[in-house]
Amino acid sequence: MRDSLEKFVQEHREEFDRHEPPGGLWKRVEKRLHHKQRGKYGIYYRIAASLFIIIGAAILVMQRHVKKPIETPADTIAVATEIKEAQAYYASVVETKRAELKQFGNDYPDLFRDFNGELDTLNVAFANLETEYRVTNGNEAVMQALMQNMQLQVELLNRQIQIIQDIRKHKNKTGGNSSLM
């Protein structure tokens, strides 16, 4: 294709050379080009685009350096309320289970004392976590540890009750001759 274009230009060279553009044509073209570049809003668009890029970059940099969104007082109050509600729930469950376990205390005093020792250990850990939670202004990890501690207390009580019930079943099957305790 290039060869045919060159051939055409060579064959019609005289015709191309005969026709010259009118004088001042290039000056008018240049004037129009410069006029469009210096448009009425051109500089404003450039400034706006530059500001947009700078602000966008600043936002991206800030988002990467921000670790946790700032909690509002309403968020903090809601979390504190949730913790208090969870504490109240688990405290009531623990007290119910302890009362149930206490019924077996007369029959198995040594076992009951051991069970209470285990629960007391969890209660001491819970008190330490509560203090740490207050000191750290509501640290999420400490709150999770508080919840896990309460869940462990309930699980421990359930297991202890199950152990005593299993001992009673075993004692009833053997006719009370078992010397487990």
Image (cartoon, grey):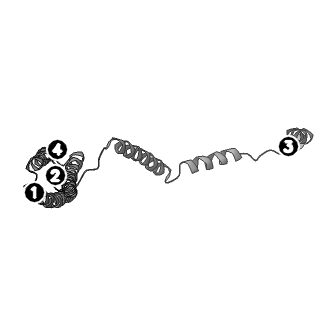
- Dot 1 or dot 4, earlier in sequence: 1
Left or right placement of residue 100 versus residue 70 in this view: left
Q: CA distance from mark 4 to mark 3?
A: 87 Å
Q: Identify the residue shown where x is 91% and y is 39%.
A: 7
Left or right placement of residue 108 versus residue 3 in this view: left
Which residue position holds label 4? 136
Task: Determine whether the residue tagged by mark 3 lies in a helix, strand or loop.
Answer: helix
Task: Determine whether the residue tagged by mark 1 lies in a helix, strand or loop.
Answer: helix
Q: Residue furthest right?
A: 11
Question: Does the image show residue 38?
Answer: yes
Location of residue 54 with respect to 106 vertically, above or below: above
Q: CA distance from mark 2 to mark 4?
A: 55 Å
Residue kind at label 4, given as amino acid type: Thr
Which residue position holds label 3? 16
Which residue position holds label 2? 177
Of the two numbered discs 2 and 4 in the rendering, the one whose residue sits closer to the viewer: 2
CB under 8 Å between callouts 2 and 1?
A: no
